[in-house]
Image (cartoon, grey):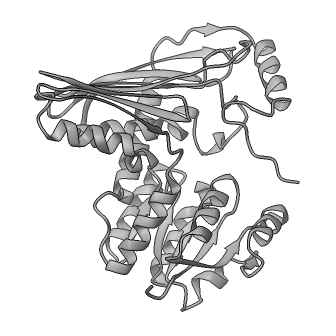
Amino acid sequence: MEQRIKIGIIGCGRMGSFYLREMLKNPKWEVVYVCDIDPKARAYALALSPHIKVIEDENLIFTDTEIKAVGLFTLANKRLEQIKKSVENGKHIISEKPIAESINNEWEAVHLIENSNLLSTVNLYLRNSWYHAIIKDFVKSGEIGDLAIIRVCHMTPGLAPGEGHEFEGPAFHDCGMHYVDITRWYAECDFKTWHAQGIRMWNYKDPWWIQCHGTFENGVVFDITQGFVYGQLSKDQTHNSYIDIIGTKGIARMTHDFKTAVVELHGINHTERIEKPFGGKNIDVLCDLFADSILDNKLHKQLPLVRDSAISSEFAWRFFEDALSHDMPVVGDLNILEEIIKRRRNMTNGYGLLQQRN
């Protein structure tokens, strides 16, 4: 085994802890530092690995010449400054999305990285899923004819308003940009036209459900539905998540229940049903491929660029703003929302529940 890649992780909250656990299991990585201003997060990191240097000052990571890469998993309003420090100190970058708190700052970050000789990637996790890889290869093989329509849906009963990272952007930006990205990834083209419709469920200030449809420059049609609006108070909760790829001759589709994903391929010469474990956020795949990229000094072709993240973020914002420009019905009231939030506080098994640390 070659020398392990020394990395410093900045931010050990919900997402940062995922990366920490995966990197500790991967023999290609050596986690030297974990930095967080929250003492509970630092205690959590130390409990996972007592040999890690657990710190509050991120500058110790940037100025350590033995550190080859940084993991940027804090909130987005910190990332542009952290990316500047990474570039100045020659550190490769693996980051959560979005890469900054505003579109202008995201593009500044993109230009900083693209004008350096450093490797970087962002967690647009759907690109690293086994099911999208199979479907993309099937489309490329010509089995469905010409790609015509891409339909993506993700509706679950969580997160509730007030949870998560709303100050980084509304739900359609925080979660929906993944579906904006994967739609563009399939189309291999830029968005041309769009129309978005939202609804202010429970009289909440922002739309908690949005559907956007439109076209790509190459004529492919898309629709994206994303919302944490799906039977929050039902006795037995469920969800609705799928992708439909429709061609001129055949189709491919995927559904999942967060445990198992099912891919169905219906081509002109080949029909197949594939059922495998869902795979979650694929952080293990992202970490492994980025380690290989550093060792090979070339970004793996499967990994998204920071440019991809900025584009997906920008169009998620554009679609959200388009929804705001149209009539937006209000259905339900804040009393129902309070009932939903109260229920989630007392749930031990549910969709998108935030992890609790003692």
Residue 246 seen in render: no
Q: Provide residue 334's location: percent of width, then percent of height.
A: 77, 15
33 horizontally vs 281: left or right? right
Q: Provide residue 351's location: percent of width, then percent of height.
A: 67, 31
* Quadrant containing the N terminus in the rendered view: bottom left
In front here: 155 or 289? 289
In front here: 320 or 288? 288
Residue occupying the point 22% across, 43% down: 137
123 horizontally vs 352: left or right? left
Tell me where residue 190 sits by quadrant.
top left
Q: Extreme right residue here?
A: 358
Q: Is residue 181 above or below residue 149?
A: below
Tell me where residue 300 sits by quadrant.
bottom left
Residue occupying the point 36% across, 56% down: 304
In front here: 297 or 73? 297
Q: How many marks?
A: 0
Q: Is residue 173 above or below residue 215?
A: below
Q: Provide residue 234's location: percent of width, then percent of height.
A: 71, 12
Residue occupying the point 59% across, 68% down: 25
Q: Provide residue 243's location: percent of width, then percent of height.
A: 37, 28
Residue occupying the point 49% across, 11% down: 327
Residue 180 seen in render: yes
Q: Is residue 129 above or below residue 291?
A: above
* Quadrant containing the C terminus in the rendered view: bottom right
Q: Is residue 264 above or below residue 231?
A: below
Q: Extreme bottom residue here?
A: 65
